[in-house]
Image (spheres, helix red, strand yellow):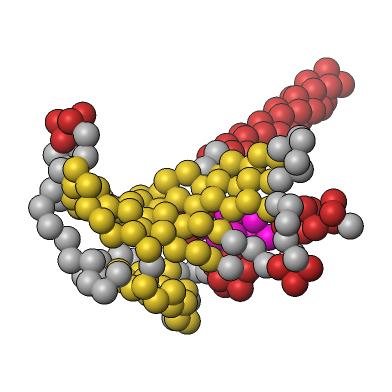
Amino acid sequence: MRSILACVLLLTIAGSIFFVAGQERQQEKKSAAQTSDAKSTSDQIEVKTDRFSGVITVKLKPQVILEKPDHQMTIDIETKLGEKGQLDFEKDDVTAKVWFRSLYKGSVDFGDHELHLLIDGKPLNHGKISGGDAEATDENMRKQRGFRLSTFFVAIFNRRDLEQLGKAKNIEMRLGSIEPMLSQPVVSILRDYANQVLAQHKIARERKQ
């Protein structure tokens, strides 16, 4: 009888150990997946600090915001923080350069070159932005993708724009005849970028004090 009870006890203990181990493995896999997701997002944002000047550069790698067989548009951003020569009233501001690049095969109507954004239904209009001159793509691009023309536009986002972007859940855009609804992965990356810039701006300001 005692041997039977001992066997039952051992089986119960062994089962508990396997259950706990299984739970730990599941938790490890879950944590690894979360870490991988975080890394895949952060890989799109590059933060570099110049060790001589202390200037912080925050770059967003190109993100596709429109994908059609005959037209592709991407967005990428660069922000420099802590640059010398700023006046006191300029130190609270942030200047982010936002590039929109179009690759297309035929013709695209960019209208009056005015950039309109709707962030969670609230307008963020930048009026006419610079650029818009069409250029021929290189031979490699024409062979691989068939895109024959390339056009760049540049907009400047300030701190208020980035604060609005940093809370975005949905973003719609219009530039001439182009009206894309940005995908949720792109919105998430843009939101992360804006918040990263604001956090780095705080660090840059504290260094200067």
Answer with the quarter of the image where residue 34 lies.
top right
Identified at 44% across, 63% down, the residue is 155
Looking at the image, residue 111 lies above or below residue 182: below
Looking at the image, residue 156 lies above or below residue 143: below
In-image side of 4 versus 24 (left or right): right
Looking at the image, residue 190 lies above or below residue 62: below
Answer with the quarter of the image where residue 192 lies.
bottom right
Where residue 56 appears, x then y in whole percent?
Answer: 69, 46
The span shown in magenta is 190-198
Can residue 144 be seen by looking at this rendering?
no
Looking at the image, residue 109 lies above or below residue 29: below
Where residue 198 appears, x then y in whole percent?
Answer: 68, 60
What secondary structure predominates along the stretch shown in magenta? helix
Query: Which residue sits furthest top?
Result: 3
Where residue 13 appears, x then y in whole percent?
Answer: 79, 28
Q: Quadrant of the C terminus?
A: bottom right
